[in-house]
Amino acid sequence: MSRARGSKALGAFALERLLNAVPLVIGVIVINFLLVSLAPGDPVTALIGEFPAPPEYVERVRAQYGLDRPVPERMVRYLGSVVRGDLGFSFANRQPVLELVLERLGRTLVLMISTVVLATIVGVVLGVWAARRPHSGVDRGATGFALAGYSIPEFWLGQILILVFAVGLGWLPAGGFRSIRADYVGWAAVVDQARHMILPMLALSFRYMAITTRLTRASLLEVMNSDYILASRARGLSERRVLWEHGLRAAALPIITVIGYNFSFIVAGSALVETVFGWPGVGRLMYDSIFTRDYPVLLGILLIVSIAVILVNLLTDVAYALFDPRVRY
Amino acid sequence: MGLSVPAAPTAVGGVRGFWRQFRRHRLGVAGLAAVVLLGLVAVFAPLLAPYDPFSTSRNAFAPPGSPGHILGTDHLGRDVLSGVIWGARVSLIVGLAAAFTATVIGIAIGAVSGYFGGWVDELLMRITELFQIIPRFVLALIVVAFFGSGLTNLILVIGILSWPQTARLVRSQFLRHRSLPYVDGARVVGMRAPRIIFSEILPNVMAPVIVVASLDIAQAILLEASLGFFGLGDPNLRSWGGMLNTAQGFVQRAWWMSVFPGIAISLAVLGFNLVGDGLNEATDPRLREGS
């Protein structure tokens, strides 16, 4: 019975968070709208970019967004077109913005997800290792590593990795998504793409390894002094089992949370790293769009990424509540 | 006045006691040294730099150790060392000014939110949440691309996008302090809200705010460098991020063009991060090791 009540409370909590997210999404759209209206020059430039567009199209955009109408009406029209999934057209790429961004999103997600997985594994292992003997050499090493991770910009790290592993040692490709000259198929193609992903992934994951290491260490040190750990030690469990099974279970929650809430920083890092390595994802698209002054693409990315961040935060909240019922009250 | 107002809980020891605490944190002291060095380089850039950071020469791609160019030259023959030295100025100005802007906004919003509560708090916290969720880098990029990447714009954009953490912190502190006896006392003697906020509560909650501010400086330096790397730095100034943007095209040919500006960014960011950690331990008794 209490279980049923618990799950109902979780549903209510999830619904509450979902409702909470609605004003945020609207806020994001309003900010986008303000950027369009505040952009220097003709607002139509912000919607089309500085690409020479056919005059009929310019007139159509003017009418569609009601650029000659008062601000509230324009706002409503803009909201309407966003809801319909119309984020404008990229003349530089000759493609609707939504389609273009979604097409590039896959490659960015592959990079981001493998980064999070790698960073979590390495960070947790290092954090546990450091927490086992606080103030030992290993602990100091892990702390130093974490400090470096917080301070080194990922785009510079990317350049250094290229210098060492591509230019110096010649082990890995310096950039791109796959080998253009060789026409690999099947497994060879997978291996080829994986080889191209190693350096960007390392550059991007360094900061999150650092964050996860520091956090794992801190949460473990906190938990290891608690009563139930003492109890499991008293029951005669080996120190290793106490650490990995009990300690880590308690530390898992803050780790999940921090990854969820850092999602928007991973997005920024990914944009920079993609630019260094010529990885054809959303980040690289952003970099290119600045130079072609393709404003609708930039605004579209801001909108889509912001909504993605809201969703990830929502999921993180719910995951947290699932593991720790206390937050629901 | 006849009424005795209860004293606020103040940190013991004053400046000297604080320094004694801070000195114990060795990494914090190292960070402070890096920050002081950065400051000196920034202030004395015109005296320290051997060349004008923009002056080109025929001596392009000179490797480090070349006569007259300790850190080498770039593709236009510009001295890398002079660029790194002048870049310290840009990073420090943007870092300090943007963090200051963010702190002022954060204090104002957090104080009003925490002191008054109610619907004001609800509304302000929603706005804070919005600013926390929007990807800072992407928004900064668009604003700078639209309105130009002059130094003032960079400072304002980074400052305006960096206040949420301070606001949340100040709010939670105000929530705690507003019902403490010394604040009740101030109300009883007829003090008005602005004065209670600024001269009674604020001084007591500044310690953690300063910690966050020093971490904000590190973040602002990183964000400015990231924008510079995207080609959106101040075009009239030589900045570390801008140098790395140029270096991107020559990674295979001139490693020194990316190595040295990157070390400079990392050291500056590390310095402010360490100072933040050190301040945190020195001001928060719970974190003091060995006590």
Image: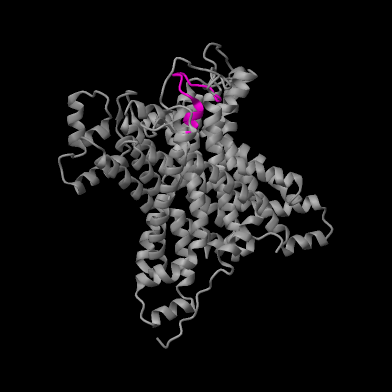
Q: Residue furthest right?
A: A236
Tell me residue A288's x, y (percent): 39, 26
Q: Nearer the viewer, residue A97 or A290?
A: A290
Compared with A21, B119 (above or below) is: below
Q: Is residue A238 visible?
A: yes
Tell me residue A120's x, y (percent): 63, 42
Classify residue B145 as left or right of residue A320.
left
Check the picture and name the quadrant holding the C terminus of chain B. bottom right
Residue at horizontal 50 percent and vertical 78 percent from the top: B7
Compared with A147, A56 (above or below) is: above
Tell me residue A327's x, y (percent): 54, 61
Q: Residue furthest left?
A: A68
Classify residue B16 as left or right of residue A102.
right
Residue at horizontal 48 percent and vertical 32 percent from the top: A272
Q: Main secondary structure of the magenta part?
A: loop
Q: Nearer the viewer, residue A9 or A325?
A: A325
Residue at horizontal 49 percent and vertical 68 percent from the top: B204
Residue stretch rendered in magenta on the structure = B70-85
Tell me residue B166's x, y (percent): 46, 56
Which image quadrant for residue B110? bottom left
**Residue B71 colored magenta?**
yes
Q: Nearer the viewer, residue A62 or A43?
A: A43
Check the picture and name the quadrant holding the N terminus of chain B. bottom left
Which image quadrant for residue B46? top left
Q: Is residue A4 visible?
A: no
Q: Residue furthest bottom?
A: B2
Q: Nearer the viewer, residue A280 or A102?
A: A280
**Residue B175 colored magenta?**
no
